[in-house]
Amino acid sequence: MEKALTTIKMPMKKIEAIIKPFKLTDVREALLELGIQGMTVCEVKGFGRQKGHTEIYRGSEYTVDFLPKTKLEIIVTNEQVEPAIETIIKAARTGKIGDGKIFISNVEDAVRIRTEERSDKAI
Protein backbone atom coordinates (compact mmCIF):
# COMPACT_ATOMS: atom_id res chain seq x y z
CA MET A 1 0.00 0.00 0.00
CA GLU A 2 1.43 3.34 -1.08
CA LYS A 3 1.65 6.20 1.42
CA ALA A 4 0.18 9.52 0.39
CA LEU A 5 2.76 12.27 0.19
CA THR A 6 2.05 15.12 2.53
CA THR A 7 3.28 18.61 1.94
CA ILE A 8 5.10 20.25 4.80
CA LYS A 9 3.97 23.83 4.89
CA MET A 10 6.20 26.52 6.28
CA PRO A 11 4.27 28.48 8.89
CA MET A 12 3.50 32.06 7.97
CA LYS A 13 2.20 35.04 9.88
CA LYS A 14 -0.14 37.86 9.00
CA ILE A 15 0.89 41.23 10.38
CA GLU A 16 -1.82 43.87 10.56
CA ALA A 17 -0.65 47.34 11.48
CA ILE A 18 -2.90 50.30 12.17
CA ILE A 19 -0.84 53.46 11.71
CA LYS A 20 -1.21 57.19 11.18
CA PRO A 21 -1.89 57.86 7.47
CA PHE A 22 1.08 60.19 6.98
CA LYS A 23 3.45 57.41 8.12
CA LEU A 24 2.47 54.97 5.34
CA THR A 25 5.24 56.00 2.93
CA ASP A 26 7.90 55.69 5.64
CA VAL A 27 6.64 52.24 6.66
CA ARG A 28 6.33 51.02 3.07
CA GLU A 29 9.85 52.14 2.16
CA ALA A 30 11.33 50.61 5.33
CA LEU A 31 9.61 47.27 4.64
CA LEU A 32 10.85 47.32 1.03
CA GLU A 33 14.42 47.79 2.31
CA LEU A 34 13.83 44.73 4.50
CA GLY A 35 12.84 42.73 1.41
CA ILE A 36 9.11 42.61 2.08
CA GLN A 37 7.53 43.47 -1.25
CA GLY A 38 3.80 42.89 -1.00
CA MET A 39 1.20 44.49 1.19
CA THR A 40 -2.45 45.41 1.26
CA VAL A 41 -3.41 48.89 2.42
CA CYS A 42 -6.82 50.21 3.47
CA GLU A 43 -8.00 53.57 4.71
CA VAL A 44 -9.89 52.93 7.93
CA LYS A 45 -11.38 54.89 10.81
CA GLY A 46 -11.26 54.03 14.47
CA PHE A 47 -10.38 55.06 17.96
CA GLY A 48 -8.60 53.70 20.98
CA ARG A 49 -7.28 55.64 23.93
CA GLN A 50 -7.17 58.68 21.68
CA LYS A 51 -11.01 58.76 21.78
CA GLY A 52 -11.46 61.26 18.97
CA HIS A 53 -11.45 65.02 19.30
CA THR A 54 -13.61 68.13 18.99
CA GLU A 55 -13.44 70.41 15.96
CA ILE A 56 -15.15 73.60 14.88
CA TYR A 57 -16.57 73.76 11.36
CA ARG A 58 -18.37 76.90 10.11
CA GLY A 59 -18.82 78.09 13.67
CA SER A 60 -20.33 74.83 14.94
CA GLU A 61 -18.52 72.51 17.30
CA TYR A 62 -18.71 68.80 16.63
CA THR A 63 -17.00 65.66 17.87
CA VAL A 64 -14.96 63.42 15.59
CA ASP A 65 -15.36 59.98 17.20
CA PHE A 66 -13.54 57.97 14.57
CA LEU A 67 -10.12 59.13 13.49
CA PRO A 68 -8.62 58.37 10.07
CA LYS A 69 -6.01 55.61 10.16
CA THR A 70 -4.27 53.40 7.64
CA LYS A 71 -4.33 49.63 7.98
CA LEU A 72 -1.67 47.59 6.26
CA GLU A 73 -1.53 43.82 6.03
CA ILE A 74 1.51 41.78 5.15
CA ILE A 75 2.13 38.03 5.09
CA VAL A 76 5.62 36.97 6.12
CA THR A 77 7.52 33.83 7.02
CA ASN A 78 8.23 33.18 10.69
CA GLU A 79 11.81 34.37 10.23
CA GLN A 80 10.60 37.74 8.94
CA VAL A 81 8.12 38.44 11.75
CA GLU A 82 10.36 40.14 14.33
CA PRO A 83 12.37 42.19 11.82
CA ALA A 84 9.10 43.34 10.19
CA ILE A 85 7.58 44.33 13.53
CA GLU A 86 10.70 46.25 14.56
CA THR A 87 10.76 48.00 11.18
CA ILE A 88 7.09 49.03 11.40
CA ILE A 89 7.54 50.35 14.93
CA LYS A 90 10.63 52.33 13.99
CA ALA A 91 9.04 53.83 10.86
CA ALA A 92 5.56 54.52 12.31
CA ARG A 93 6.43 55.85 15.76
CA THR A 94 5.92 59.55 16.47
CA GLY A 95 5.99 59.18 20.24
CA LYS A 96 2.50 60.63 20.55
CA ILE A 97 -0.81 59.02 21.42
CA GLY A 98 -2.46 57.34 18.44
CA ASP A 99 0.68 55.91 16.85
CA GLY A 100 -1.24 52.66 16.31
CA LYS A 101 -1.16 48.94 16.97
CA ILE A 102 0.29 45.81 15.41
CA PHE A 103 -1.52 42.47 15.42
CA ILE A 104 0.08 39.15 14.48
CA SER A 105 -1.86 36.02 13.57
CA ASN A 106 -1.13 32.62 12.04
CA VAL A 107 -1.67 31.90 8.37
CA GLU A 108 -2.15 28.24 7.51
CA ASP A 109 -1.53 28.50 3.80
CA ALA A 110 -1.33 30.84 0.83
CA VAL A 111 -1.91 30.19 -2.86
CA ARG A 112 -0.75 32.33 -5.79
CA ILE A 113 -3.65 32.15 -8.22
CA ARG A 114 -1.61 32.57 -11.43
CA THR A 115 0.91 29.78 -10.77
CA GLU A 116 -0.81 27.80 -8.00
CA GLU A 117 2.35 28.08 -5.88
CA ARG A 118 1.66 27.47 -2.23
CA SER A 119 2.91 28.46 1.20
CA ASP A 120 5.94 30.77 1.40
CA LYS A 121 6.52 30.43 -2.38
CA ALA A 122 3.19 32.21 -2.88
CA ILE A 123 4.19 35.24 -0.88
Image (tube, rainbow, N blue to C red):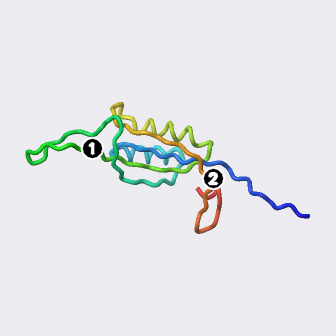
Label 1 and label 2: CA atoms lie apart by: 36 Å
Residue beneath disc 1: 65
Is 122 placed left or right of 54 in the picture? right
Spot the residue most to the top: 95
Please name the residue shown 64% across and 56% down the image.
119
- Residue 122 at x, y = what percent? 61, 58
Residue named by callout 2? 108
Q: Position of residue 108 (x, y in %)?
A: 63, 52
Q: Nearer the viewer, residue 28 or 97?
A: 97
Q: Secondary structure at mark 2?
A: loop
Give left or right: position of 53 versus 18: left
Of 62 and 6, nearer the camera is 62
Residue most toward the right? 1
Q: Amino acid at mark 2?
A: Glu
Q: Residues within 10 Å of mark 2 (few under 14, many from 20)?
A: few
Question: Is 51 rendered above or below residue 121?
Answer: above
